[in-house]
Image (cartoon, rainbow, N blue to C red):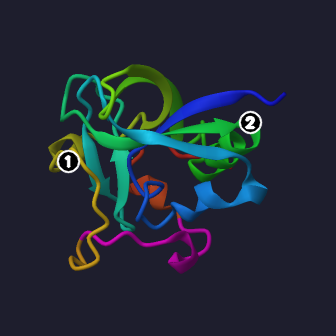
Amino acid sequence: MASCYLVFVYGTLRQGRPNHYRLLEAASGFARYLGLATTCEKYPLVIASRYNIPYLLAAPGYGKCVLGEVYEVDDKMLELLDRLEDHPKYYERKMKKVKLQESGKELECWVYLLHKYKPFMMELPFLNDYIAAADDPEKQYIARYLRKEGDDYWLDVKMDEVTA
């Protein structure tokens, strides 16, 4: 029997967001929606880089309690999410506590955080909910298929170089 994991998603993987389809692809593994949740601890959620990517910064105690969704996933889906988030080179997957909105139950979930980010990121507006603002070109998320191949966009936000 495959292992199951709880994952908290706060950005483009949420329902109605550009990468949510990845959680729906049966060939990519199993994912079951458990509900809306918020982080128990405050974190800075910012939109940054030339592609307007949402980042949850590894700075607990700063920012706001962040709204997201909890999914139960299998090994295969967790591996896909790790590849999508370039864990552990870009985002790092860490276990954090979230609270389901409907029941109030607290859960330990995997969350993808950005570590070793550039200092200016702490000066950006902190959000409690990521919105892919289609009507605001300044904040519109740029999907991977629209990006220049080989673009080192992580240099926009990371202190150290991400290596392949």
Q: Nearer the viewer, residue 14 or 102?
A: 102
Badge 1 amino acid: Leu
Q: Is residue 88 left or right of residue 141?
A: right
Q: Main secondary structure of the magenta part?
A: loop
Start and end of the magenta stretch?
139-151
Residue 104 location in percent, x, y? 30, 24
Q: Is residue 64 left or right of residue 26?
A: left
On the image, which quarter does residue 72 sit in?
Answer: top right
Badge 2 amino acid: Asp
Residue farthest along the right direction in this orientation = 1
Can residue 94 be seen here? The reply is yes
Q: Nearer the viewer, residue 162 or 24?
A: 24
Q: Residue at x 52, y 46 (%)?
A: 161
Residue 45 location in percent, x, y? 27, 44
The answer to whether 105 is drawn above or below residue 147 in the figure is: above
Asked whether 71 falls inside the magenta stretch, the response is no
Camera-near label (2 vs 1) is: 2
Q: Which residue is mark 2?
A: 75
Q: Is residue 100 left or right of residue 6?
A: left
Q: Which residue is mark 1?
A: 127
Q: Which mark is residue 154?
A: none
**Secondary structure of the residue carrying numbered label 2:** helix
Residue 33 location in percent, x, y? 52, 45
The answer to whether 101 is drawn above or below residue 83 in the figure is: above
Residue 21 location in percent, x, y? 57, 64
Can residue 118 be seen here? The reply is no
Q: Nearer the viewer, residue 74 or 32?
A: 32
